[in-house]
Amino acid sequence: MHPPHSRKRPSHRWGRLVPRLLAVVALVLGAALAGPVDTADAAVTLTRVTGFGSNPGALNMYVYRPASLPANPPVIVALHGCTQSAQVYADNSGLVQVADRDKFVLVLAETTSSNNLNKCFNWFQSTDNQRGQGETLSIRQMADYAVSAYGADPQRLFVTGLSAGGAMTAVMLATYPDVFSAGAVVAGLPYNCTKDNSPYTCMSPGVDLSPSQWAQRVRDANPSYTGPWPRTAIWYGDQDTTVVPRNATELRDQWTALHGLSQTPTRTSAIGPDATQHDEYVASDGAVAVEVDRVPGINHGTPVDPGTGSEQCGATGAPYFLDSICSSHWIARFFGLDGSGPGSLPAPTGLRATAVTDTSIGLSWNAVTGAADYVVHRDGNPVATPSGTSYTDTGLGAGTSHSYTVAARDAGGTAGSRSGTVTATTSGSVAACHTGSNYAHVQAGRAATSGGYTYAKGSNQNMGLYNTFVTHTLKESPTGYYTIADSGCP
């Protein structure tokens, strides 16, 4: 994220702050983040759309539509990072590949240097981060246009973005919870951090508020709103020095508090080729309301994994697209778009693990009216189509963890939306013990860092400062889940 240097007329408060901070812009962040961006070939053909509304934020709208779309397709609105463009984001983020696979309309909003010298969305500016005005209204109008022009499903509108676009994603979820059902914030910030802080302080070192204080800032954005809050995914690199990892924690606090959930994850697992830490916060209906994905070893940017595998996407042909994990694949999965089909049946509720053995996991869920049968997915892949509301998955390894979702199918075999995810572990695992410095544990993938501290993966226990002078013994049971066991292991 480049420093937020807006060309638009600032509010009274920012009119006082911005001149003092321009020197900081040049000296601290400008040189570190500047560089050519449009280095990737423009491989994706986008359609420019004009006349989508009054467009008070003076944004550009581009659309990518797969060759074939179901009736009433979903829509993802994508918001690029500073110095980028809609074209660069389309070419490198992997969203186009995922749109082709999962059949959704991709809308790319674009800001320009006329709005902001660094082509950042003005997430920090009160004229652009409030409902019914500026850039927020322009983006909302793009979503409305997609519904009317392409017959898109107004109940399946989603938003995601990187850096300033990630911060603006949080803005859209806060100001239009009645429009967007879910969003994914990549290297972004909590909504309205700049209410009483400069954007630079928000970016680094970050601002620490209580979950209830963060939640109130969202409620204040739309005081009359009484409906459900959007589901929110939060992505960041654990080595990010531009928008520091503390912001992911504060974002988590903001959105778990809105959903009335604890800040302790319901379950933790590792996903992708780099063992990204995947924390899920599950609501009472079994749906994942908030998830946090901590990508190890990367700085500031969109996580991508170039290739043709089922979980690969994206390219590294431009700055801030970092070879690690295909975040767009997992974001689409969080949105319920990864092969869940165009069916109208709702997601089953109440998915739960009923029994486990060394080699099997039993599941049950609530019936869906109109369902002919169900599709059970293990670790993202379909494994069974039971006619009833229970299933026992067999032939599993001892001490292994697996994630499950289930979708109802109509008489024509069309699957509806998937349920929330349930993760269960077979019994029979043998604890393994690992002793080393906090630095060694992180390097070995047994722990992660945040805000200068070290946390055991799985249990998320605080192990103290991230350095070579603090030593702990970690017990691993089941595989990939670590707890502090200094007093004895196993």
Image: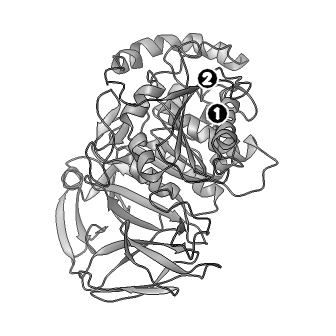
Residue annotated with mark 1: 139
Graded by Cα atoms within 10 Å as few (under 14), some (14 to 19) or many (20 or more), the crowding at tag 2 reads: some
Q: Is 265 left, or right, of 92 in this rendering?
A: right
Q: Is 475 left, or right, of 285 in this rendering?
A: left
Label 1: state its secondary structure.
helix
- Disc 2 and disc 1: Cα gap in Å? 8 Å
Comparing 19 with 234, the one in front is 234
Residue appearing at x 45%, y 46% in the figure: 99
Residue annotated with mark 2: 59
Kindly tell me whether residue 486 is visible in this rendering: no
What amino acid is at disc 1?
A: Ile
Comparing 7 with 66, the one in front is 66
Residue appearing at x 57%, y 64% in the figure: 343
Label 2: state its secondary structure.
loop
- Residue 237, image x, y percentages: 36, 42
Residue appearing at x 61%, y 16% in the figure: 17
Q: Which mark is residue 240?
A: none
Residue appearing at x 42%, y 37% in the figure: 244
Q: Quadrant of the N terminus?
A: top left
* Relative vertical location of residue 444 with respect to residue 236 in this rendering, above or below: below
- Residue 483, image x, y percentages: 31, 68
Kindly tell me whether residue 88 is visible in this rendering: yes
- The numbered mark, 2 or 1, whose residue comes first in the sequence reads 2
Q: Quadrant of the C terminus?
A: bottom left
User: How many marks are shown on the rendered structure?
Assistant: 2
Indicate the quadrant where residue 20 lies: top right
What amino acid is at disc 2?
A: Leu
Graded by Cα atoms within 10 Å as few (under 14), some (14 to 19) or many (20 or more), the crowding at tag 1 reads: many
Comparing 146 with 215, the one in front is 146
* Relative vertical location of residue 472 with respect to residue 391 in this rendering, above or below: above
Check if mark 2's residue and mark 1's residue have beta carbons within 8 Å: yes
